[in-house]
Image (spheres, coloured by chain):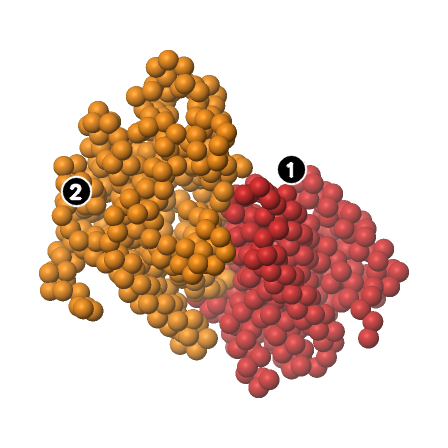
Amino acid sequence: MNFEPDEEQRLLAASVARLFEDHGAQPSADPVRQWRDYRDMGLLGLPFAEANGGHGGRFEDVMLVMEAYGRALGQVPYPAVALLAGRLLEAAGGPTAQALLAEMIAGTKRVALALYEPGRRYRWDDPATAAECDGEGWTLTGAKIAVLGADRETVLLCPATTAEGLRLLAVPAGTAGVAMEMLPTPDGRQAANVRCDDARIPAAAEIGDPARNPALIAAAVDGAIAAACAEMVGAMERLLGLTVDYLGVRRQFGVAIGSFQALQHRAADMLMAIEQARSMTIHAVAMLDAPAAERTVAVAAAKALVNRSSRFVGQQAIQLHGGMGLTAEYPAGRYFQRLTVLENLFGDTGHHLDIVERAGV
Amino acid sequence: MELGFTEDERRFRAEVRRTLIEQVPERIRQAVREEKPLPRAWMVEAQRILNRNGYAVPHWPIAWGGRDWSAVKRAILAEEIDRAGVPKPLPFNVALIGPVIAAFGSEAQKRRFLPPIANLDLWFCQGFSEPGAGSDLASLRMAAVREGDHYRVSGQKIWTTYAHKADWIFCLVRTGQGGRKHEGISFLLIDLRTPGIEIRPIRTIDGYHHLNEVFFDDVRVPVENLVGEEGKGWDYARYLLGQERTSMGNVGFSRRRLDRVRELAGPLLDDPGYRRRLTWAEIELKALEITQMRVVANERPPSAGPDPKTSILKVKGGELLQTAAGLLLDALGPEALTAGFPQAAAEEPFQGHDARSALVSAYFSSRKYSIFGGANEIQRNILAKAVLGLGKAA
């Protein structure tokens, strides 16, 4: 085993760290410009095969990028668009998916996977959203929620139940019959709730096929979960850094509060939680190429542990910052908000523990 | 021993419950149950109803509206107020400044302040914490210099809840230097309309605006607004902290949150892992309820200062509210991400996209329970030193 990044990976990590920190330092971020920066640095094409117009990066590279993204509290929907929807397009293949992927890599089109539905928690494989075919195309009806990365120009990849099984339709957000409500998430980003009422989708907008779709989506989601774990590790690492700094400068009773052993031990517990989370993230990344059953258990186990670490680290960081941690202006609170959102994303701790338990581990 | 509630106490509970439901409008109780911030006018409305019934200040001297009710009955009252979704009587008024004025204020101060404080005709906020004086409160630096018939006050207070809604602020100020840092502290009442006061909002991670910084730049405060004697402010603050503890454990509030968990969790109630977390929370609540009553039934004179065991209520009660908030957040699943989140330091009931948005805010906001009013670390110091005799006395 060798956990050290090679020279090329070190360069990648350093340059994305610089870019993301620059973006984070901008008082009013211009998302269009930031997205262009991601493209220019090759990040939009990073995880895709060269044959598909990508840069042939590996999961390990994505992990390094996402740790840096987490440390810098990245704002643009890179993970949702490139690492979830983009990876699904690549795995599905076929002309429609390939054309969308090429535009996504070129930075001219956004795609987002509309996974969740009201009242169904994290279940996506049996959607209430339904599509009917009349020979010329599809009529799509249903509701999707919490679509991260979507805006009004996005192409939504919508899983829908049909007579033949689970279909995946590429639905431009502007399609007649599609209503989108953009809502602020607790970490200052946006997500969409989407309603489709008899939206007409051309037959050519179909991606994948019912026989393969559940497996394709499951693999794309697992990859996105591993990326989210890396983002959480990066965010936790920075949050602990902020906390340790604060313990060193905040003085009460005539001394730095970091001199109190109870608080030192709390910080040490946070460190251990983060290192265990990092190890499980590495495990998940290492297993992304494994057979589906093993991959899914590894990824679920990782998300469960990273989630638990994240709740502990986030809550304790706020506690150790005292009132300062409760303010929206001080960065610790923003990391706590981001970690809370990521903990929820793709399944909370209970959801992933269930997956691990059902596998009989 | 009488380990259960007496017949009289049970009757009292039933009567309080009926009165609250009959008299406090459903719109107010619903907003409280949904954990939405209330408009100021609704809080005033609710407290006036409580006051009319003798429920706002039962622990005060009878001459000023108090009732001759046992601490157990007052604890029952506090619990029922929370359970019914009635806003608590403003704690800064009824639990903090009111008893201090009643005990140490001049006759003129009592006549001037106590009736409007009880009725929330006058809204007080609490000016204790400063940027450099949080857990270490006695390090406070805001200075009041006496000049004839007034003080000139300069300095800063922070974490001041509802300063933007308040009429007056009660402050610990430094009137003397030298000696131990607990000495030279005085207790002043300050009208927030006095020139030289600036209130700046602090937006918190729940998306709302409850907290403020309050800046005092050479503010003139009449000497008649000094409570008690100059330099005795720390004693009064200690007295204040030893006051009404009957709702310290927030038993009724936790009960309400766990009821809400049951309403919202749906199929999760059949999930063994989630179910077990909820079951533990219920057991913790029962234990807390009885610990609360044990502390309450052991009445001490206020001059004895705070009962160190109230620290157990503070820590356990706060942790339970945090646990319940976590259960609520998890009950929402992915819908927590798109319930809408208040963005512009919302003040009035947030017209969020659905009622669940307030619950997401409540998860973030609940972190405060282990921080304000003496962080849990400070409470554990108190338990270790004052109850267990470990280390040196504080």
Quadrant placement of the C terminus of chain A: bottom right
The reply to whether residue A31 is in sight is yes
Outermost top residue: B148
Q: Which mark is residue B382?
A: none
Name the spot of residue B379 as percent of width and height, x first.
44, 54
Q: Nearer the viewer, residue B394 or B253?
A: B394
The disc labelled 1 sits on which kind of residue?
Ser
Residue shown at the point (17%, 53%) measured from the top left: B70
Chain at tag 1: A
> Splitting the image into 4 quarters, where does residue B50 fall?
top left
Q: Which mark is residue A28?
A: 1
Residue pointed to by mark 2? B66
Chain B representation colour: orange
Neighbor class of circle 2 (other Cα within 10 Å; few <14, some 14-19, many 20+) is some
Q: Nearer the viewer, residue A9 or B132?
A: B132
Quadrant placement of the N terminus of chain A: bottom right
Chain at tag 2: B
Chain A representation colour: red
The reply to whether residue A84 is in sight is no
Q: Nearer the viewer, residue B13 or B261?
A: B13
Circle 2 or circle 1, nearest the eye: 2
Answer above or below: position of B324 versus B246: below
Residue shown at the point (33%, 25%) measured from the top left: B226
